[in-house]
Amino acid sequence: MTEGSTAAVHGAGGAAPSGNLLFGPQPNVAEAAGYPDAPPRMGFFTDTSVCIGCKACEVACKEWNAVPEDGLELTGMSYDNTQGLGADTWRHVAFIEQRKPLGGQEPGVHHGGFDVFEAARQLGASPSSPGPGATAPPPESAPAGAPAGEISPVSPDGRTELRWLMSSDVCKHCTHAACLDVCPTGALFRTEFGTVVVQEDVCNGCGYCVPACPYGVIDQREGDGRVWKCTLCYDRLGVGMEPACAKACPTDSIQFGPLEELRERAAARVAQLHAAGVTDARLYGESPDDGVGGDGAFFLLLDEPEVYGLPPDPVVTTRDLPAMWRHAAMAAASLAALGIASFVRRPR
Amino acid sequence: MSGSDVTRGGVGGSQPGRDALTGARGGRGRHRRRRGRGEQPMVPEARFSSYYGKPVLNKPTWKPLDIAGYLWLGGLAGGSSLLAAGAQATGRPALARAAKLGAAGAISASLAALVHDLGRPARFLNMLRVFKPTSPMNMGSWLLAGYAPLTVAAAAAEVTGRYRMLGAGATAAAAVLGPAVATYTAVLISDTAVPSWHEGYREMPFVFAGSGASAAAGLALACVPTGQAGPARRMAVLGAALEMGTFQLMKRRMGLVAEPFEQGGPHKLLRAAELLTAGGAALSALAGRRGSRPLAVAAGAALLSGSAALRFGVFHAGVASAEDPKYTVVPQRERLRTRAG
Ligand code: SF4
Ligand code: SF4
């Protein structure tokens, strides 16, 4: 994977990068894309540790952007029936259930010796539970075997670990966006906010961007032929409003703002979570040194990225494009030589 | 929930394999384990996590017939242009005629396939509204915009017998662009996140070059009298050797992501490609020695279909690699582990 190509792209030195790099840190994407007085780069910080899986973001996105319905199916795999990002899903809330405690978790299901099931069964039937007004049996009347003062075990071996991970996924608005790089029509473009947007009046539906995206975000809409994805609400940004999903998020799991500020906020949040004992907390996509030069929309995750359906180490495919062109040129030369060799002597 | 009922008596009705387990090596992705007759896996089964076995990538939306056909026809055209120019220079009129017509026909059909595959075919010309070296499809469009008219001019001059000088010039110019037409398609598919396409970017252009040469040779063998088909026979053998040799090299280099080439439908196609190409090359040599037309026609048909089978095999293997999270997650994890030291 790592060949001379990286060095070739970085050019000599590799100091303060300017112009269109294919790979590596790029502190000023909008300027490199040709906006002289660009506003600060805007993005999302999705803090999944406070996501409650309400899907308000999915709904708000569909509403604001008039994204068509794309099947009302029940997957049966989890509470997630949206399944993944695509042409008609620009926000997707992943749902994961794990046998693992959330660090420092206060489950809040402490029964204190009180058994609700038993109490319910006794309701109105037993003299100690004659009906409304007298629902609490004396602690010693709890049935044998019910653990006093503990959480009811949820697994046969008595373990009580359980956590739900929820995460609202979205287009990453990559610093080096493969979709944008490979688009042959220029339909995909970089906005002054440093985001990546499709111009639906230019896209000819060649579909090249679809397999180019290392995150599986952009896709072709059936019956329409063109591709669609999150625009980071380009229309709302233009008039100084925040994107619909961030606006709708009731827990501020989705935070919108200048990328620099979000990165600071995210670093502080990780430190806070680590201090609270949630050692699983980590940032994903925030580093300008990663394979796509950092994401404009990055995440705080509580497990490995692949658990959420995210690639653990995505690399923009065009990083290797100079090497690809070189190899293709050599192959073309070989083919020409092969052609000449076929004629040099008359076989008979 | 993960499909189990939590009761006071414990957990009942649990459905194994539905849990999203913890960590990088937690669960095993649910992937088809079809493997050709008793073949050994190239890499030991890897354990990895995924989101309910769902793919990380969105798979290509390209229609197999259009795009695999486009790859094949591009190679056929590029190789034919070489044969046309060589035949013209060495005075083999029948070979030149077949190759010129073949190049023009193949490239026209491939353009038609490309346009047909677009979600908005009427916007085809949007491909030429920018000049964008980071987009192989854009570069390819410009290349074809130059190449296709040249082949058509060469073929038209050949058929009508007029403007011979112009026709000769067009033939020569098409031969200069031809090899690029045959190999750029490898960059086209490699410049994606599709594991089994991207990881082969070093050798794929050579595979496609060989495949294009053998297809062009096949067409010539099928259409040209044996006396003039000598160069086509040599091209068949050289092209087949280049294609098969570099394909083996590519698979060896790719590691885990070579697996989709060895499984299921793609494997059958690629096996057929191997047999047809090797058989076609051998037959063509034999046909040359015996001077037998029927043998030459059979060799030509085998080479043409072998080249097509290769493109379809590569196409479907790529799609399969995008559909299975294993090929995205495991190599990336491996990379992270190596980097961490
Ligand atoms: S490559 Fe994918 S994630 Fe990155 S900007 Fe394009 S669609 Fe979004
Ligand atoms: S489908 Fe549209 S946006 Fe995607 S690469 Fe093709 S022209 Fe560009």
Image: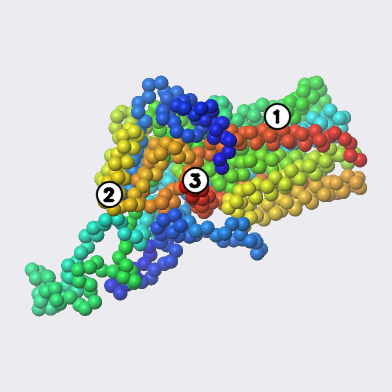
In the image, is B55 to the left or to the right of A65? right
Q: Are marks 3 and 2 on the same chain?
A: no
Identified by mark 2, the residue type is Ala
Measuring from the top left, give residue B168's x and y in whole percent.
79, 24
Q: Which of marks 1 and 3 is in front?
A: 3
Q: Are marks 1 and 2 in contact (CB under 8 Å)?
A: no
Residue under label 3: B339
Protein image colouring: rainbow
Q: What residue sits 35% from the left and 34% below the top?
A: A259
Q: Residue A58: which quarter of the image?
A: top left
Q: Is mark 1 on a helix, strand or loop?
A: helix
Q: Residue A113: which quarter of the image?
A: bottom left
Residue under label 2: A275
The answer to which of A144 and A7 lies nearer the viewer is A7
Measuring from the top left, give residue A229's x and y in whole percent.
43, 39
Q: Is mark 2 on a helix, strand or loop?
A: helix
Q: What residue sits 49% from the left and 46% below the top?
A: B339
* Disc ID at residue A242: none
Measuring from the top left, give residue A275's x and y in whole percent.
27, 49
Measuring from the top left, give residue A185's x and y in whole percent.
53, 30
* Disc ID at residue B177: 1
